[in-house]
Image: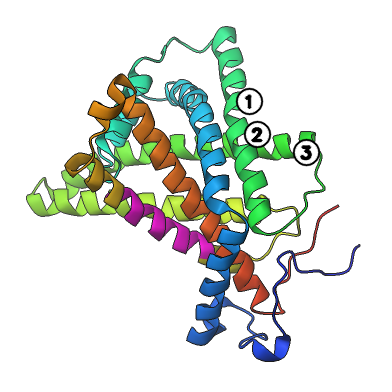
Amino acid sequence: MAAEKPIHQSDRHDTAVPDKDAEQPSQISLRGWRQVVQRGWAGAQADQVPLLGAGVAFFAFLALFPALIALVTMYGLFADPGVIADQVNSLSALPAEVRQLVVDQINNQNRAALGWSAVISVAIALFSASGGVNQLMIAVNVAYDGESRRSAIQRRLIALGLTLGSIVFIVVMLGLVAAVPPLLRQVFGDSPAIRVALSAARWVLVVVLVAAALAVLYRVAPDRSSPKLRWVSVGAAIATLLWLLASIGFSVYVSTFGNYAKTYGVFAAVIVLLLWLWITSYAVLLGAEINAEAEQQTGTTKGRRTG
């Protein structure tokens, strides 16, 4: 096995770094976190994260609709796929154009019973969708300053696993979101307070799921030994918060000040979706940069390359 080696190299000396013996994120001081954030931001500029994010957004756009095909088909095995459209419509933090474009694609999907043709369609859709995940893995590895030793086949298999796992996870959670609120209303009634509580719970669930998905991505995507979840959770939490705030801000801007319909005409919804995907990609990659620097702040969690 190769000797332990940090993935992300910093121009620092151990004597100048506080908290180098920290064994968990909570043991890093405020000064240490300030250094982490500063180096993470500098690393994002050095790694050209805005440009990387644009590339990831493009491939995510290409992967989005095949992923929706797989999601609608798999969810349709157990329940009405219209529930997916209802849940997307309830995400008010997303720009209205993004929600409408996604909902239209969901409603236009063929919801025929599962047969060989549907199985083949799902397999093709999963493979196509995994292309976007594959590009995201490459970008995250760049954020960690890693040179991937995985072959193209290895990367695609991991991307397929992440894609399939994500869709199955979403199917299960959509089922819970659809089934639990009616049960709670039967038990506690349908008062305004209950409706507000259920709406708040939906957003809490979204935030938790996004953070959990990012933690898995940060743990699996870089070509190195998997760190403990408590370390990748830091960047996941920061990226989720940035994504949520940026999505809300972008939604408000588009609905209040944006003039995309006049500028882009029928392509306005596509442009807004691409911009939102870029914002999402930027937040995800910035979280990876912060994770890489948080691990470099201490000598107790150095990732090793695999292979």
Q: Position of residue 208 (x, y in %)?
A: 41, 55
Tell me if 235 is positioned left or right of 79 in this view: right
What residue is shown at x 60% (from left), y 43% (from top)?
Answer: 136
- Residue 295 painted magenta: no
Q: Position of residue 124 (x, y in %)?
A: 61, 19
- Magenta range is 235-248
What residue is shown at x 59% (from left), y 53% (from top)?
Answer: 48
| Residue where numbered disc 2 is placed | 160
Q: Residues within 10 Å of mark 2 (few under 14, many from 20)?
A: many
Q: Position of residue 61 (x, y in %)?
A: 48, 31
| Residue where numbered disc 3 is placed | 154
Q: Residues within 10 Å of mark 1 (few under 14, many from 20)?
A: many
The image quarter containing residue 111 is top left
What residue is shown at x 65% (from left), y 66% (from top)?
Answer: 228
> As shown in the figure, which amino acid type bears the numbered disc 3?
Gln
Tell me if 221 is positioned left or right of 168 in this view: right
Quote the CA–CA distance across marks 2 and 3: 10 Å
SS for tag 1?
Answer: helix
- Which comes before the other along the chain, label 2 or label 3? 3
> As shown in the figure, which amino acid type bears the numbered disc 1?
Phe
Here the colouring is rainbow
Q: Which mark is residue 127?
A: 1
Can you see residue 125?
yes
Can you see residue 86?
no
Q: Position of residue 249 (x, y in %)?
A: 28, 52
C-beta proximity under 8 Å, tags 1 and 3: no
